[in-house]
Amino acid sequence: METVLRYCDVIERAGGMEMKLPAGEDNAADKAGKGSKRKNPARTRTLEGEEWKDSEVVECVGCLEEASAFLGLARVFSRKDKVRELILEVQRFMFRVGCEISSGNKVVEWKDVEKLEEVISDLESNVEIPHSFLILETSAETGFLNVARTVVRRAERRAVSLYRKGRVGEELVQWLNRLSYMVYLLILLESEERIEV
């Protein structure tokens, strides 16, 4: 969460979004921390103020960070330049996705979804799409990629909850949906063997 906030601070200073200072809710847990230099360990700062750490917003950002971490592991282990470059580009954009989730301000646009779909089309032309279920983990990199793919799908489910409440745009949900498929294609690109179910 702190990494996302630092990135969003940069965007805010560039005039890209309005930053709101943290403001805790007036409840017993907040009052317990008043007069003390210790911050409430059950709360964290977002671009809209403080949130409980088990809130839908914090959970969704956490899923995004987790997915990025596993993508990073896959990037480190990958032997293909194209895969490493695509993952790094995605990791950078995930900070923008986190900004929208954390702030409630629109960041992800349809052009971002379309860009991802162009990458998907290119990948589809370079891999053989299977017609049966596969065990996808055949190496360290494919294992990390598959964990990342499943965490992205969890982030998408959390984002749907936020979308239904008007917190994030449809474009963000669609971007996450397309990202999980793109990662699946990266797994196929990295795989040197196919293990059918």
Image: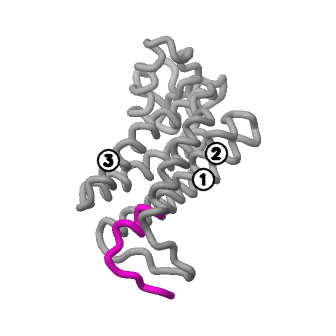
Q: Report the residue marked by disc 2.
A: 173
Residue 177 is labelled as 1
- The numbered disc on residue 85 is 3
Q: Quadrant of residue 39?
A: top left
Q: Secondary structure at mark 3?
A: helix
Kindly indicate the quadrant of the structure image that contains residue 148. Answer: bottom left
Measured from the top left, where is residue 165 in percent x and y? 75, 38
State how far apart marks 2 and 3 are (Cα): 23 Å
What amino acid does circle 3 point to? Answer: Glu
- Inspect the image, locate mark 2, and give the three-letter code of the amino acid beneath it: Val
**Identity of the residue drawn at 44% across and 45% down:** 65
* Left or right, residue 16 beside residue 160: left
Residue at 40% from the left image edge and 48% from the top image edge: 68
* Magenta stretch bounds: 185-197
Q: Is residue 119 visible?
A: yes
Q: Is residue 171 a member of the stretch shown in magenta?
A: no
Q: Position of residue 120 (x, y in %)?
A: 50, 54
